[in-house]
Image (cartoon, rainbow, N blue to C red):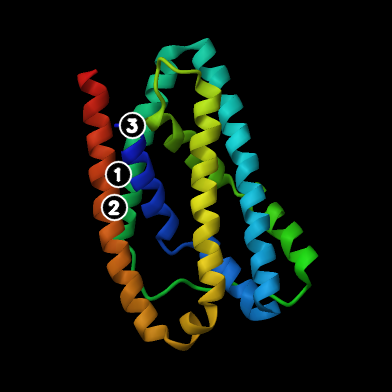
Amino acid sequence: MMTFIPFLLAALVLAITPGPGIAYVVARTVAGGRTEGLASCLGTGLGGLLHVLAAALGLSILVAQSAAAFTVVKYLGAAYLIYLGIRLLRREATGVARPAVRAMGARRALLEGVLVEALNVKTALFFLAFLPQFTLPAAPLVPQLVLLGAICVGLNTLVDVVAVFAADRLIRSDTTRAARARLLNRASGVTLIGLGSILALARREA
């Protein structure tokens, strides 16, 4: 439980922070309406689950070969959280740019969402660095990684769905949206830096 609470906090912060995923589903909603936007949310969620499974299998092989290498991955993951926090604090938050897309129908939007997320190398690196921070050595590794990863994907998808329903409002109030994004970036950055530091120190004490 003590490990799960920091994980849930970090996953929630990362899910609500404006980024390419939210920008994509908003753009898809603008181009093809709410149905197409929701289909793209489902697609990116499925693509994210593919990354979760790949990360679980890859990390399980890594820990089977070298426990020391797995520990290195954990420390690198803590450093990655701090890096994300610093990047958020330095970001010029003028709102998230929406990619230009055309209406294509719900089925095509779903398939494109799966493809876009499945081919996102940054997502793969994120799960490899992030998930090991919150695993328990005494419990089986793969089920933990799959569960934690599925929670991350679920939170991201939920936030994307909210963004779809709020797309019209986000588009109309660019100034307000930029101010909120700036505040959210700062709060998220400080939180991630703190979590990364706590995790790194906790591992050293162990």
Location of the N terminus by quadrant is top left
Q: Mark 2 near mark 3, Cβ–Cβ under 8 Å?
A: no
| Image point (55%, 24%), residue name | 142
Query: Disc 3 vs disc 1: which is toward the camera?
Result: 3
Q: Which residue is mark 3?
A: 1
Q: CA distance from mark 3 to mark 1?
A: 23 Å
Up the image or down, 18 lies above or below 102; here it is above
Query: Residue 100 versus residue 201: which sits nearer the camera?
Result: 201
Please give the name of the residue rendered at 26% of the width and 31% of the height, measured from the top-left corner: 200
The answer to whether residue 100 is visible is no
Q: Residue 178: tell me if it is visible.
A: yes
- Give the residue at x 76% y 57%: 111
Q: Which quadrant of the rendered structure holds the C terminus?
A: top left
Residue wearing tag 1: 82
Of the two numbered discs 2 and 3 in the rendering, the one whose residue sits closer to the viewer: 3
Q: Label 1 is placed on what type of residue?
A: Ile
Find disc 2 in the rendering and name its residue.
86
Q: Quadrant of residue 44?
A: bottom right
Extreme residue toward the front, this view: 1
Q: Residue at x 29, y 55 (%)?
A: 189
Give how far across and how far down residue 194 sits, in percent.
Answer: 23, 44
SS for callout 1: helix
**In the rendered view, does 206 fall on the left or right side of 66?**
left
Residue situated in front as seen by the camera: 143 or 85: 143
SS of the residue under disc 2? helix
**Residue 95, relative to residue 117: is it above or below?**
below
